[in-house]
Structure formats: C-alpha cells, structure tokens
Amino acid sequence: MAETPVKELFATYLALPPADLRDFLFTGKPLIFKVGSAQLLGEFRLQENRLVIELAHIDGGGEGALPTIAVLAEKYAKQNNLMGVEWVVHAINCANPNLKLRRVLERRGFQIKDVPGLGEAFYLTGHWR
C-alpha cells in the first residue's frame, strides 16, 4: 500500500469539521504520529487563544518534520482566529541528541528557556494580529 504524502494527509485533517479535528488533536494526552520519516511524540493544546505544540520525542529526522508541522500549525491557528503558535521542544537533554535538529531549531529562532511547569526546552512563540 502506498503511503499518503504528509502535506496531503495534513490537508485532509485541516479539512475536517472543527469539532472532529479538536476531538482528534486536543485530547489532553500525548500523541504518537509520523511526519515523513520522523516519528514524533507530542501534544497539541489550545491555551489562552493560541495553539501550543509540545514535542517530547523525535526519532528519525525531525529536522524535516518541523517545517511541515509549522506551516500546518500556522494555517490552523489563523483559520481558527488564534493569536499565535507556541512551541516547546524537549530536545535539550536527549541520550542521543540530533545535532541537525538542534541547528534547525536555532536557525528558526528557538531559544533554550525554562518553561514554567515543563522545565528546560527549546521554546518559540509566534504571534500575529
């Protein structure tokens, strides 16, 4: 069976009725999902009128997955009149750190920050309006 291209798959999710998408993404529990060759463990939540993406584990090339997730997250946030997207990526103290991922995070403007209630992580927030 052929694998569905990532952008097509996410476009399908974005086309879901808002209530169905909320039920799928915003469960209050971490999700395991695949983007390209990367497998990710993360949680999506709506908090204070913004989309919060917390990634706890990334295996197999997360540096390519992040830009795809970023485009789709921003599109979702704008479609739903959210103020922005907040990212928390727990890639500070990995047993086998992905140096490419670290460079991608730094190039995209992520900074190491002590995030209240979550600890030290790469952090980025983007706002509009």
Image: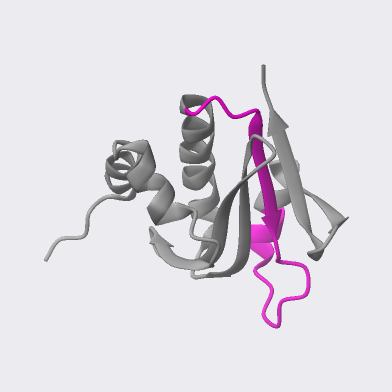
| Quadrant in the picture for the N terminus | bottom left
The location of residue 79, given as percent across then percent down, is 46, 26
- State the extent of the magenta-drawn residues as a range: 80-103
Nearest to the observer: residue 59 or residue 72: 72
Nearest to the observer: residue 108 or residue 75: 75
The location of residue 13, given as percent across then percent down, is 32, 44
- Please name the residue shown 86% across and 55% down the image: 113
- Please name the residue shown 84% across and 55% down the image: 112
Nearest to the observer: residue 19 or residue 1: 19
The location of residue 55, given as percent across then percent down, is 61, 61
- Please name the residue shown 56% across and 60% down the image: 43
Q: Is 64 above or below relative to 41? A: above
The location of residue 28, given as percent across then percent down, is 55, 62
- The outermost residue toward the top is 129
- Please name the residue shown 27% across and 50% down the image: 5
Q: Is residue 99 magenta?
A: yes
- The outermost residue toward the bottom is 95
Colour option used: one colour
For residue 42, side relative to residue 47 (left or right): left
| Quadrant in the picture for the C terminus | top right
Whether residue 87 is visible: yes
